[in-house]
Amino acid sequence: MQPSIAESGRLVVTATVPATSIIPSSFYEWLTATPPSAPTPTPTVVVEFQPFASATPSFSLYNSDIVFVCYVNESDEICVMKADGSGMKQLTSRPGTDWYPSISPDGQTILFSSQGRGDFNILSMNLSGENIQQLTSGMDDNFAPALSPDGMRIVFASTFGGDQDIWVMNRDGSNPIQLTYDERDDIDPVWSPDGTQISYTSSRNGSGTLMVMNADGSNARPVTHGINVEGRNDWSPDNSYLAFYAGPPGDKEIYLVDVSCADIAGGCGPEQLKKLTHGGNNKGPAFSPDGRWITFASQYDGDNEIFIVRVDGSELYQLTANRRADWQPRWGWRP
């Protein structure tokens, strides 16, 4: 089973690297489109892909990377593989938990949260797992770091002072600045591709709400309502859509929502969302650099494994099939 090389779409100019991306026309018609039929999970690892035509120079599944959390020897570590499932490599082997990895826009640096022997701190390393540097200290627990599109700042969530709130700091860890001050948790922040906004999940309304705010913390507003959003989300490369996961315990699904829902009072409800998955308890979606695919973790086979699916919900592929949990995937590319 191989992805189709032929695909209709339109060229979208973006403000970030890579400079262009192709997104299927159906993605732009998703609000009125007939929901796709439930995909059939693949029971084995898929590694034989054909590169598809793309207006993004040199991009293919073969030359892009997915970083993720791998549970090895009863410890959460950071692993990386090619987006076709090949070349898997364990990058960390440290005391405590390593998780929440992300890849920098230039594809050269991985940021992650590490417990070590105390609080969770933000660390960086290169794509081979070398040159590990600790960027935070004395700020209680810190999670979900992501580098800004211009490579200058890191957004993250911190429990410093109480509940989790959203913070930013310089790339070297200096000058941390708190952006949110909610009485409940604000978690899992992500930069918009143009660097002007930050999305995150908030429990301010008693259940999970997908939020966006300006990069300086101003003008925070909900994108969703009426559906319990949890954890990590991601932006499409053209700045137009957010992928997230939501649902009751043990039955999470991957959804898309139009970012313009943030301009509607209260955000958009369940009837205005696009559901991409159908069963399997799915979490942590992230877009491919060209916007054609989404990677996520699913429990289709009993424990968490890494999958990819096209943005219209078709062509589901399983990338890992281990007797361990693989989860929290994030996509990156070295142009």
Image (cartoon, helix red, strand yellow):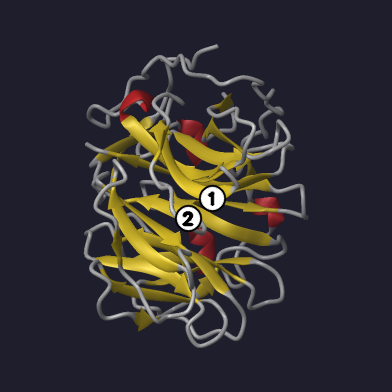
Disc with the residue nearer the chain's start (1 vs 2): 1
Q: Which quarter of the image is occupied by the C terminus?
A: top left
The amino acid pointed to by label 2 is: Asp
Question: Circle 2: is it few (<14), some (14-19), or many (20+) Cα within 10 Å?
Answer: many
Query: Is residue 3 at least partly visible in the picture?
Result: yes
Q: Position of residue 157 (x, y in %)?
A: 47, 71
> Which residue is farthest top?
1
Eyeballing the image, is 16 above or below 114?
Answer: above
Q: Which quarter of the image is occupied by the N terminus?
A: top right
Q: Which mark is residue 76?
A: 1
**Residue drawn where x is 66% and y is 37% of the image:** 277
Q: Is residue 256 left or right of residue 199?
A: right
Q: Which mark is residue 98?
A: 2
Q: Position of residue 69 (x, y in %)?
A: 51, 46
Give the image quarter of residue 168.
bottom left
Eyeballing the image, is 295 above or below 146?
Answer: above
Eyeballing the image, is 264 above or below 5?
Answer: below
The amino acid pointed to by label 1 is: Asp
Contact between labelled residues 2 and 1, with CB atoms less than 8 Å apart? yes
